[in-house]
Amino acid sequence: MLSSRQQRIAALATAVTAFTLAFTSGSALAQKKYDTGATDTEVKIGNIIPYSGPASAYGVIGKTEEAYFNKINTEGGINGRKIKFVTYDDSYSPPKAVEQVRKLVESDEVLLVFNPLGTPSNTAIQKYLNAKKIPQLFVATGATKWNDPKDFPWTMGWQPSYQSEAHIYAKYLMKEKPDAKIAVLFQNDDFGKDYLKGLKDALGAKSSMIVAEESYETAEPSIDGHIVKLKATGADVFISVTTPKFAAQAIKKLAEVDWHPLHIVSNVSSSVGGVIKPAGFENSQGILSANYAKDGSDPQWDNDPGMKKFVEFLAKYYPDGNKLDGSVVYGYGAAQTMVKVLQMCGDDLTRANVMKQAASLKDFAPDTLLPGVKINTSPTDFAPIEQLQMMRFKGEKWDLFGDIISGELGN
Amino acid sequence: MSAAEDVVTEAPAVEAVPKRAMTLGYGTSLVVLAMLLIVPLLVKNFIIFQLTMLLIYGLAVLALNILTGGSGQFSLGQSAFYAIGAYTSAILMEQFDVNYALTLPIAGVICFAAGFLFGQPALRLSGVYLALATFALATAMPQLLKLGFFEKWTGGVQGLVVTKPDAPFGLPMSQDMWLYYFTLAVTLAIYIFSVNLLKSRSGRAFMAIRDNEIAASAMGIDVALYKTLAFGVSAGITGVAGGLGAIAVQFVAPDSYTITLAISLFLGMVVGGVGWLPGSIVGSAFIIFVPNIAEGISKGLSGAVFGVLLFLVIFLVPHGARQVAIVGQQLVGKFRKN
């Protein structure tokens, strides 16, 4: 049976060759171009993500993406090619990330590396992938440095950067509360510092609006002391650049010390289940934040066509996936963007063309992004999502308000 | 034997290993060396990179082996010395343009000093208490590296990217292959040094302390000096391994050197056989390749699969690779007789 199949393939190949030789010139052949990792039947995509270790909660993203590519394959693939998704565990450890990415590139021979997670891991592999000219596409981190097409033309981000998000709050404050006295509490790491820089950049000449800055270490058991100190400065705006555990502590402490400034929490800590509920709904009324993706727990999206597709996908291809988990929503959107780029590539599946197409996305809107948030890239703009919408916590959920705001500076 | 006696005659924490049993015979050493020399010529760059990491972790395990197998002291803080070595090399290379080969001895000396100093307070502790004190060192290190005060040099949480050296003298060799042979040379030098150290007067002093501290001091051995010296030597070698690791991985960041690394190294030592220096490379192979095998078996349960494999090793060959080697030797002996 095998031999008959081989014969058939051989016959087909001969026929195709004969056909092309007889009826077309070299130009028809030239249309199909491949680099390592792509063939007539398959596109190989590599990925690393922590499936074990301290950040293993993010492993869900990899599983969602695998399920989404399965869905695409079941529906016939992309231009007739099936996606082969090779994903490895890096345990959130940079040396392991280097080893696994080299395995993907040199042993599995993937066409590109998609959505590797974590700022340290991505920094560790960036130089290697750029030297080898292998796309490091849609990295899963909010650091601002991925948008650097001049120095790293093979690396591109996906989600809005921390700085973009900070720009949006600064723009909002300058418009709505120009005489605000801002107190900032930030986590002492790349996330917190990137964010603070974004705030100051966007405030520009008015950065004196920031009257107090306090930083905390993730190892601190409680941030109560910082809150008391910030309250004493008499600030009337409190920006909480915190991760979930500390964001919840801050909300509680503010209520305890009876301080009621305009309270803004960063998007990473806007989860209703993970932050607001533990901190108490009664303490959280009127808090502001911003978002770019739809929230699986929000009933206003129940009849949204995009979210309906998302829920159907979960039911059919990833029944273990929890639609309330932000990571699942994230993985779906990122995988959809990847598929879009591969579709745009057509039959020219070279690494250079993959980067070229990834840098020419125009108004692409994955199902799980907020209406109006669109992915736009260009050869000089490697930051796919730069828009967010402000939201206010009311009752037991977030209410979106105002326009979609761009986090880009200078417009 | 009564229960009371059982408690009194508690086995020492580290089994006494005669120094002869610490090394390989000449013939076997040459075969292993030949393999280490030839294999890289036949495989892909990625495998060469893995082999380089094998040697580097092997060095770090060897260092721990000198400390635990030689002088009988425990350490769960080797990741801290590894980190200091890695950062020393990275900072010297990137900020001060020092040649990579020169950074290694500097890393070694700095770590020797750090280890020697840490050995001073550690003198008062033994067994599990010492293990806990070193554990504290390992947990503290990543946070110290993130401190704003050092950020000018360390790059803070972002870490430092290191440039990989090219092969010198225009040798027709890839960067990976050159780095492998460079690492191999360093590893061999340190291995020979370690074997000789354990055979020397100091080595005998280490082992006397390991076997019975009171008897050792009665014989006139300066227990405090030799214990701290063992710490220093172990830390120094770990530092060189860390420096090599930074060059091979081309990146240092605080998150690379967490307590997980220290535990991996400890695991490597046990699997390789406590006190058996050649076992270090086997232990290193275990900590590099077995997690990959476990992941291949089940992605979601990789940790559990790794646990089962580790349990099997500890249960079937509690003395690690040394036990396998001894059984192998006996089999060869029998075969020859027949």
Image: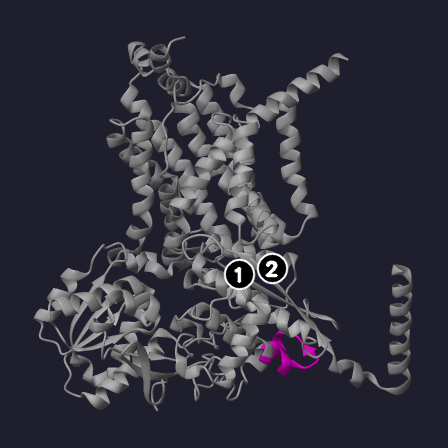
Q: Which mark is nearer the camera, 1 or 2?
A: 1
Q: Main secondary structure of the magenta part?
A: helix
Residue identified by numbered label 2: A104
Does any portion of residue B183 appear in the rendered image? Answer: no
Amino acid type assigned to the residue bearing label 2 in the image: Leu
- Find residue B209 and report its horizontal and vertical position in percent: 35, 18
Chain ID at mark 2 = A
Secondary structure state at the residue bearing disc 1: strand
Q: Say if A37 sits above or below A180 in the image.
A: above
Q: Say if B115 sits above or below B141 in the image.
A: above
Amino acid type assigned to the residue bearing label 1 in the image: Ile
Point 30% across, 41% down: residue = B137
- Find residue A253 and report its horizontal and vertical position in percent: 17, 65
- Find residue B290 and report its horizontal and vertical position in percent: 56, 43
Point 87% across, 69% down: residue = A9
Q: Which residues are magenta?
A: A340-354
Q: Say if B217 sits above or below B250 in the image.
A: above
The quadrant the C terminus of chain A occupies is bottom left
The tag earlier along the polypeptide, 1 or 2, is: 1
The quadrant the N terminus of chain A occupies is bottom right
Residue identified by numbered label 1: A48
In the image shown, does B24 or B3 lie closer to the viewer? B3
